[in-house]
Image (spheres, rainbow, N blue to C red):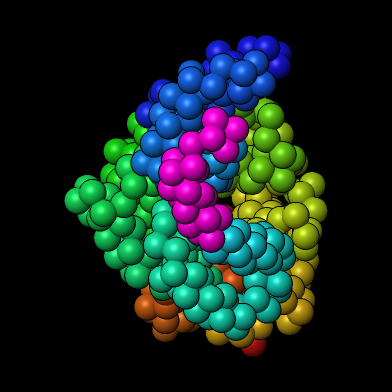
Amino acid sequence: MLNHLYFLDHSDSRHLVSRRYQSECLDLLHKISILFAEGEYVLTEQLLKRCLSMAQKGEFTQYVVQCARMLSTLYAQMRKAHLFEKMDKVLQQAQHIQSLEDEAERLHAQTQLALASTVSSRRAVLPLLPAHLEKLEALHRRAKTFNTYNYLYRLRLAIHELQGNYAEIIRLTALATKQLREGKLNERRFDKRYNHFMTVFAHLRSRQPTKGLKLAQLAMSDFHPSSSNWLFFQENHVLLALHAQNYEYAQQLFTTVMKNPAFSKQRPAALERWDLYKAYNDFVHPTQRMGPARRVQMARWALMLPEFSRDKSGLNVAILVLQMLVYMRERNFEEIMVRLERLRKYQQRHMVGSGMIRSKLFLRLLRIMVDKGFNSKQAAEGGKAILQQLQSTNPPGEAYAEIEIIPYEHLWALILEMLRDQFPVPTAFGAQG
């Protein structure tokens, strides 16, 4: 397998654009090292100059340093003092730039580690991010390279993502696309796939699913199906289809994604997320091919999902709500009450702060459903004011978010429809006087 790595095709535009240029530099450096060791100084110098030029165009500072160092050593051995002094200046400047980029990379890595952890840790790191942003801005002013720009750009997007400033993410990603088109960003380095991902994600979270779905459909061709980025992008693509209530299209996406050979190689947590998305879609829009046995199988799977699991951060409410929906379809009112009690306890323990307003409002609607004895008409009337408040409340930032696989407004409409179809309700669960 290792031998085949030399023959991978990096020229496909659906891969990270920098890979092809980086691979060319590495290939040259490998050949240069062999030639230099064999004493082929003339050819070594020619290839080093070529590699240095490529590294400078691609802003690969580490390769600029490597080429400049080898050229300096070469010129010293060849007794070419003038060329040595000239290359030594290039080396010193590149080493200075690399030290700035290394510091920017360290700050970025620290931030990424904190953001990749639990919801509570993301909340905790949020107040610290402005200081990191200020340091990165200072480093970029000094270095003015693509690497420092990229770390700064991604941190800005991460802060807006955590705070729920999705309109600003849409503005920044559009600006970056414009700068790339105008030649102000290095086309050999800028990852347009990341920009697509953030743009589509921001449209999802800012409740613009129809526009976001169109953008996702256009951007899909820029992702190679063999890459993990394709699968991450498709998660938002599917969620946009679900939020736009385009359930047929969502079903087509599930089929496409699950046929991908890379799908089964994902981490267990990612596979369970996909199962959860599909379970919601199958529940709200069961396909004609899904027989009673398959429905029972999916229902059993949903009921076996562990609640309050760390690896399902942001999905705990979605799991409990799905389980409650399954029991509603089965008219198992006792288990519905159990799930509602668990949701109440989860709210008391974990749903703190203003970032959980939408989830809290939805739980209030569910309690009204119980208070009105599962009567659809009375629940709809009693929840009218809360529903209006829910419709006017924007989703929170990622630091606080419980993911809405299907928007709460749509779930409430589905619940009312189910209640209309399931009367009469057992007397024991009738409205309380």
Which residue is drawn at the image coordinates 67% and 39% (left, top)?
A: 271
Residue positioned most to the left: 182
Q: Nearer the viewer, residue 187 or 74?
A: 74
Q: Nearer the viewer, residue 11 or 56?
A: 56
Where is residue 29 shown, x and y percent of the image? 56, 27
Is residue 243 at all visible to an observer of this figure? Answer: no
Range of magenta residues: 76-98
Depicted 287 relative to depicted 364: above or below: above
Q: Main secondary structure of the magenta part?
A: helix
Which residue is drawn at the image coordinates 54% and 35% (left, top)?
A: 79
Where is residue 405 shown, x and y percent of the image? 53, 54
Depicted 303 relative to depicted 258: above or below: below
Left or right, residue 330 beside residue 256: right
Where is residue 179 shown, x and y percent of the image? 25, 55
Q: The C terminus is located in which quarter? A: bottom right
Q: The N terminus is located in which quarter? A: top right
Depicted 30 relative to depicted 173: above or below: above
Where is residue 301 shown, x and y percent of the image? 74, 41
Picture quarter containing residue 8?
A: top right
Answer whether residue 86 is magenta in the image: yes
Answer whether residue 192 is magenta in the image: no
Q: Nearer the viewer, residue 204 or 380?
A: 204
Left or right, residue 337 beside residue 421: right
Picture quarter containing residue 11?
A: top left
Is residue 53 at all visible to an observer of this figure? Answer: yes
Left or right, residue 372 beside residue 1: left
Left or right, residue 195 beside residue 115: left
Which residue is drawn at the image coordinates 72% and 39% (left, top)?
A: 267
Which residue is drawn at the image coordinates 48% and 57% (left, top)?
A: 93
